[in-house]
């Protein structure tokens, strides 16, 4: 029975990985890629508390609290699935994920290295994946239209519609609330997508440059080439091991 529960938990975690462990929100949301980074203007370095609200076209609102650190294109996002709402996990799955160390995740996007690190502190492991091409592209044209003024989280803001267009003519459209008392930092970003509407709310904003160590893999963590191998290997360890790697699996690089 215990092994059955653990395997179910692993499957749940694997199902959530494409949604929350990639460099952007799930269900067609606005990815924190090159286009998104253009919305921060001259604010090239900052840290903040981030709440992502994802409303699928068919489904309930998903709210994901977390933290973000950003420095000249490099982005670190910290998430805890145990604090998310609207995920509709199977009964007991959230508690199992926490006990197995699968609830906390950190993503580090490194455009210069064309890499994204998916880090699981509870497993002391991480995956080094290629970063999607869209996240490394910085050649964009930005067009802004003022829509009005509004107060967001106590900040006087200018509400803007922003179009970010890449070299091939593909355009991303955002609604952005720039805080005039915070060097025009975008304290709220919203985007409507074909699969989901996404809103990102930034609070506790600090425009101080974050520590360089935040964008490095944790020392002593096991490195894997893909999430599936990491999950299966770590689950086998927690279940007593002895079953080896799955067919086609590769051992982690230390």
Image (cartoon, grey):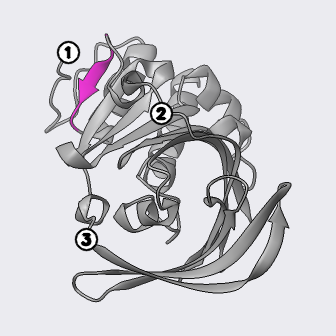
Give the CA distance from mark 3 to mark 2.
24 Å
Q: In the rendered view of the protein, which quadrant contains the N terminus?
A: top right
- Residue 195 in view of the camera: yes
Q: Position of residue 79 (x, y in %)?
A: 58, 39
Dot 3 lies on which element?
loop
At label 3, counting other C-alpha atoms closer than 10 Å, the crowd grade (few under 14, some 14-19, many 20 or more) is some
Read off the residue under disc 1: 254
The magenta span reads 220-225
Element carrying mark 2: loop
Assign a secondary structure to mark 1.
loop
Mark 2 or 1, which is nearer the eye?
2
Where the C terminus falls, by quadrant?
A: top left
Q: Does the magenta-highlighted stretch encompass residue 165?
A: no
Question: How far across and how far down the image is residue 155, in percent?
Answer: 80, 57
- From the top left corner, tell me how far across and down residue 151 is, in percent: 84, 66
Between marks 3 and 1, how big is the CA–CA gap?
Answer: 36 Å
Q: Earlier in the sequence, mark 2 or mark 1?
A: 2
């Amino acid at each position: 029975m215990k092994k059955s529960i653990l395997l179910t938990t692993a499957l749940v975690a694997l199902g959530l990985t494409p949604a929350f462990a990639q460099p952007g929100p799930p269900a067609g949301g606005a990815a924190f890629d090159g286009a998104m980074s253009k919305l921060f203007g001259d604010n090239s370095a900052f840290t903040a508390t981030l709440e992502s609200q994802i409303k699928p076209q068919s489904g309930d609102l998903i709210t994901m609290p977390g933290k973000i650190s950003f420095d000249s294109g490099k982005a670190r996002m910290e998430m805890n699935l145990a604090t998310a709402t609207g995920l509709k996990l199977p009964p007991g799955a959230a508690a199992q994920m926490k006990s197995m160390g699968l609830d906390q995740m950190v993503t580090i996007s490194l455009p210069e290295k064309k890499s994204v690190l998916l880090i699981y502190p509870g497993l002391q492991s991480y995956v080094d994946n290629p970063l999607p091409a869209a996240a490394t592209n910085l050649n964009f044209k930005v067009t802004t239209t003022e829509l009005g003024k509004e107060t967001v989280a106590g900040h006087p803001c200018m509400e803007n519609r922003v179009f970010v267009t890449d070299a091939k003519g593909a355009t991303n459209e955002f609604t952005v609330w720039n805080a005039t008392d915070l060097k025009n930092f975008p304290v709220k970003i919203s985007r409507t997508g074909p699969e989901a509407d996404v809103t990102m709310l930034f609070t506790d904003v600090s425009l101080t440059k974050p520590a360089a160590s935040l964008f490095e893999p944790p020392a002593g963590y096991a490195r894997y080439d893909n999430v599936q191998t990491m999950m299966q290997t770590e689950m086998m360890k927690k279940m007593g091991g002895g079953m080896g790697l799955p067919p086609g699996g590769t051992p982690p690089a230390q």
